[in-house]
Amino acid sequence: MHSRYVERDAEAMVDRYARQGVATDVALRVYTTRLLGQDPALVLHGGGNTSVKTVVADLGGQDTEVLSVKGTGWDMGSMEPAGMPAVRLAPLLALRARAELADEEMVRFQRANLIDPMAPNPSVETLLHAFVPHKFVDHTHSVAILSLTDQPDGEKICAELYDGRMGIVPYIMPGFALAKKSAEVFEAAPRAEGLILHKHGIFTFGASAREAYERMIEMVALAEARLRRARKAVFVTAQLPQTCAPLASVAPILRGACSLADPRHEGAWRRLILEFRSNDAIRNFVNGADVAR
Ligand code: ZN
């Protein structure tokens, strides 16, 4: 994975949005948000989020410190300034003093502090963006990072790989508790360039849009290299029978084996729809002598 940041493209976007009255911070935020969102190894449609801490005039003309953060319903790959609602930063920061905060209450609080009351709901991960001090914050559910953290010893692998450059946050459902825990992990290692969220994804920080974006690329590239090192490309094939049963005979058995009893109705089953996929890499894996491992 390589940086796709092009200074000339970034400047062109700043100029284009300036003519529509969009500030430089937000224009650059939109530029790198699209770079992240257009790479399916980083972001699948609708996933991930980004933010910038900046100053805007509120509806009364008063300069106000805000967090502009991805709004729900927007896709990073086709982000526009309208998809980055501005929320007053000071009230968000004051929430850290609370012991807990339910999701519905958090959404209401965030909406109540929007600069534009017509803006979309700020991301469910808004508070995590607010609680770290950096100007630009990027978040993705990168495939390579998940491939590392979704292993039994994922936290240990990441701690070794990033060697203090990234804070490691244990798994917590997204929301207030995760935001608070992430801020604590960061404050215990304030030189960290980002956070690895166990079984969830990665955050990177920067003073500029480019710095946060290129840290994302660098950290994900390290994860990709680590996966390549540890991965066996070819498996020794097991003894296979002369002829294999046809798919049509096997599929109903598999489907039955995957069904779950439905506790709501006696004798009822919750069944799954299966999709058949095959290629050389899949066959090499499933025919491997140590597939049971
Ligand atoms: Zn996330």
Image: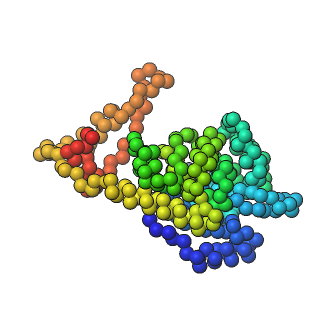
Image vertical order of residue 65 relative to residue 108, above or below: below
Q: Quadrant of the N terminus?
A: bottom left
Q: Quadrant of residue 259?
A: top left
Whole-percent x, y for residue 239 in the image: 14, 45
Residue lying at the far right of the rendered structure: 60
Whole-percent x, y for residue 222 in the image: 43, 59
Given residues 189 and 226, the one toward you in this image is 189
The colour scheme of the drawn protein is: rainbow
Q: Residue at x 59, y 47 (%)?
A: 188
Q: Residue at x 22, y 51 (%)?
A: 235
With 117 as the anchor, is 103 left or right in this view? Answer: left
Q: Quadrant of the C terminus?
A: top left
With 76 as the anchor, is 287 left or right in this view? Answer: left
Residue 120 seen = yes
With 64 as the anchor, is 3 left or right in this view? Answer: left
Given residues 97 and 22, the one toward you in this image is 97
Residue 175 seen = no
Whole-percent x, y for residue 192 in the image: 56, 55
Image vertical order of residue 221 relative to residue 130, above or below: below
With 174 as the anchor, is 219 left or right in this view? Answer: left
Q: Residue at x 33, y 48 (%)?
A: 276
Whole-percent x, y for residue 51 in the image: 65, 58
Residue lying at the far top of the rendered structure: 266
Image vertical order of residue 48 relative to residue 152, above or below: below
Tally of marks = 0
Q: Residue at x 56, y 57 (%)?
A: 193
Given residues 260 and 33, the one toward you in this image is 33
